[in-house]
Image (spheres, rainbow, N blue to C red):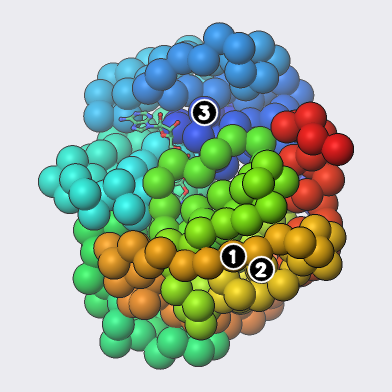
Amino acid sequence: MGVSIMKRIMLTGALGQIGSELTMYMRSIYGNDNVIATDLRRQDESKVVKSGPFEMVDVMHPDEIADVARKYKVDTIVHLAALLSAVAEAKPQLAWNINMGGLFNALEVARELKCSFFTPSSIGCFGPSTPKDKTPQDTLQRPKTMYGVSKVSGELLCDYYNYKFGVDTRGVRFPGLISYETLPGGGTTDYAVDIYYEAIKNHKYTSYIDKGTYMDMMYMPDALNAIVTLMEADPAKLIHRNAFNITAMSFAPEQICESIKKYIPDFTMDYDVDPVRQAIADSWPNSLDDSAAKEEWGFKAEYDLDSMTKDMLAKLRKKLDVR
Ligand code: NAD
């Protein structure tokens, strides 16, 4: 890292799957007091609340975002508050309001206060007409889900704030994220987290995603590192802004099952496919081409399926106190 771009960072949606770990990771780099966590709800027992500044902020209220950003004199906003794919499909109107309204409000604060800005897009920004294998950085994006519609619109809005107002917006298209700290918030790839919990607790799992359904995935440590590396990258090298394809692995349910069997030999899996989440998964790419992220800011993932499985099982055994 050269000269640090981020010195005082505010996160929205900081108690979620990404934010709960990103807050702690950023506090370890930038100092506890320089990373301000915010969320709609409060969890007093959470490490996020205990280890540094925490404020209640509803991103639907622009003043609440602006008041906290001013109070702590932040130079960077990491906007994570959103409804995820499966929840958004069940509540499309609410998802549009939160995902787009919240993003707009956060971008406006970034414009007024001259903050750098990060928000994640997703593999959900692609649709059935997108090339499925090695999906290019610049390609067709005609998603058929409200989550996808909000993600494509969000990418465009961030690009607009960059070229119209000069806001330093940056983003990645996250694949399914796998982590042991905080449970996922209702996405299509949640099965790839649930499976590890069930493998440890019951040695069996029923997958709601069908065999042969490939999706991109990433272990949380690689996702956290990607956010900080992109935010600290030299802006002159960034041709793309919102958002970069990134990936660490692409697998189908039967492959994560095989990987778990290497460590838990009597583990078994069957299927009870959920048509809603299966349809979403079928409309997403099988694998992404992440060469633009590699070229423009040196993206690199450390974990593959087997090294992730080994680490997940070890960390979860400890967390769940199962030998
Ligand atoms: P999550 O559902 O785990 O957490 C979202 C957080 O936002 C929650 O703590 C919730 O309380 C908060 N929130 C909801 N509405 C709010 C509001 N009005 N004001 C303030 N906070 C509010 O989500 P996550 O997995 O941490 O995802 C964060 C971002 O990353 C989202 O934009 C999501 O689309 C994106 N993303 C996540 C994944 C993944 O696999 N987790 C993959 C691709 C993209």
The 10 Å Cα crowd at callout 3, few under 14, some 14 to 19, many 20 or more, is many
Towards the viewer: 168 or 151: 151
Q: What residue appears at the point 22 percent right and 71 percent down from the top-left corner? A: 144
| Disc marking residue 148 | none
Distance in Å between CA atoms under marks 2 and 3? 27 Å
Q: In terms of sequence position, does the residue under pointer 2 or pointer 3 come before the other?
A: 3
Q: Is mark 3 within 8 Å of ligand 1?
A: yes
Dot 1: element: strand
Does residue 154 sit above or below 137 in this rendering? above
Kindly state the secondary structure of the residue where label 3 is placed: loop
Q: Mark 2 points at which residue?
A: 256
Q: Where 224 falls versus 152 (above or below)?
A: above
- Asked if residue 2 is positioned above or below residue 296 in the image, the reply reads above
- Mark 2 packing: few (<14 Cα in 10 Å), some, or many (20+)? some
Q: Please tell me which residue is depicted at 59% across the width and 35% down the height of the picture.
A: 182
Q: Position of residue 194 (x, y in %)?
A: 56, 49
* Residue 19 appears in the figure: yes
The structure residue drawn at horizontal position 86% and vertical position 38%, both measured from the top left corner, is 323
Identify the residue position indicated by label 1 in the image.
Answer: 269
Instruction: Report which residue position mark 3 lands on.
Output: 15
Q: Quadrant of residue 56?
A: top left
Q: Callout 2, which amino acid?
A: Ile
Whole-angstrom CA distance, mark 3 to mark 1, is 31 Å
Closer to the N terminus: mark 2 or mark 1?
2
